[in-house]
Structure formats: C-alpha cells, structure tokens
Image: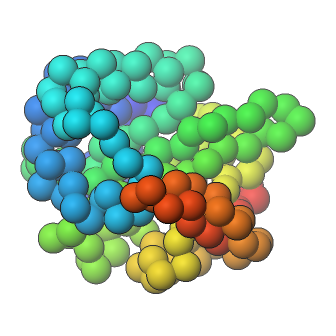
Amino acid sequence: MWRQIETERLTLKLLDKKGAGQVLDFLLENRDMIEKYEAKKQPLYYTKFYQESLIQTEYDAALKKAYLRYYIFEKNREEVIGTVSVGQLRPYPYNSGVLGYKMAGRYMGRGYATEAVASMCEAAFGYLGLHRLEAYVLDENIPSIRVLEKNGFKKEGLCQKNLCVNGQWRDHFLFGKIK
C-alpha cells in the first residue's frame, strides 16, 4: 500500500486521526483561500473532533482502495502544506476517479502542487488501478489549470452549474487524464 510517497522535495503521507491537529492548523490558516473554490463547510468542519473523524474515515477507506488522500509536507518538516486526493471512485467498466488538491497560500508558486499531483497520478494508476482521472476547476483558477496541464491533463469541456461555491452554482472546466 502506498502509505507514504517521497518526491524530490516533498513527502506525501496518509494520516490517521493523530494528524488532526496538523490538518486543522492547515485548514484554519488557509480557510479564506480554500473556501473560494469549494462547497461551503459547516462550522463543525473546523474542529479537531471533526477532523479526527474525517481523517480516520479517509485512512480506513485508503486501506480498502475506496478513497485516497495524502497530506503534503516539505521533506523533513512536520507542517501540512497541502493535500491531494482521489475520490468518487467508479469501478469497472469505468475505473475512474476525481482528483482534488489544495496548497497553503504561502507555498503556492513553488511547483509543489505540480509535484504532488504527479505522484498522486502514479498512485491512482498504480495502487488504485485506475484507467482515468478527472479534475474540475473554475475557469479563473489559472494556477490550478497550469498544474493540471503540466501533469498531462487535457481540457475536455465545460460542466455548467457543476458545484455550489459560496451559495452560487458555478461552471467548472473538466480535465481528464488517461493512464
């Protein structure tokens, strides 16, 4: 099982509930930026109790190949600087999943997201045995589009009113990558 991945500059780790404090620090520090691109979270989401439960559920799902989320660290550091995940797994005949990722604002522009997504693609196609990855991105999120393009994802179309972000149904570009 791919519990930890080492890249040139990063360590990607599966965490269990013991990592909830680190994850919560990351989420709270980057809350305003993250919420610009995601569905609205309930206040309970930003509590250690909730994160412990969520992280343990994700960890257990990773062991069953039902979901995979890595927390991103700079090598030899203990601060969470981002996450990368593959969820919404669809079995054969699709063998597909949806890629998601987020980085701490102060670590953006260093190529870390590109490096982490490359490793996640390897894990998704290898460990999870997927044939296809999809990613959805708002049209104004140029840095995210660049991360996908650098990793070989191709823009496939526009999904109208795809996700409710801050109370508004927003269009998203659909990107895909085949193994």
Can residue 9 be seen here? The reply is no
Residue at (40% x, 58% y) in the render: 166
Residue at (53% x, 72% y) in the render: 138
State left or right for residue 112 relative to residue 117. left
State left or right for residue 51 relative to residue 132. left
Residue 135: percent from left, percent from top: 60, 59
62 up-or-down from 95: above or below: above
Residue at (19% x, 58% y) in the render: 30
153 up-or-down from 48: above or below: below
User: Considering depth in this image, is 150 or 66 the residue closer to the camera?
Assistant: 66
State left or right for residue 158 relative to residue 81. right
Residue at (44% x, 56% y) in the render: 167
User: Considering depth in this image, is 62 or 161 the residue closer to the camera?
Assistant: 161
Residue 55: percent from left, percent from top: 32, 26
If the image is split into quadrants, where does the C terminus sit?
bottom right
User: Considering depth in this image, is 11 or 42 the residue closer to the camera?
Assistant: 42
Can residue 142 be seen here? The reply is yes
State left or right for residue 166 relative to residue 123. left
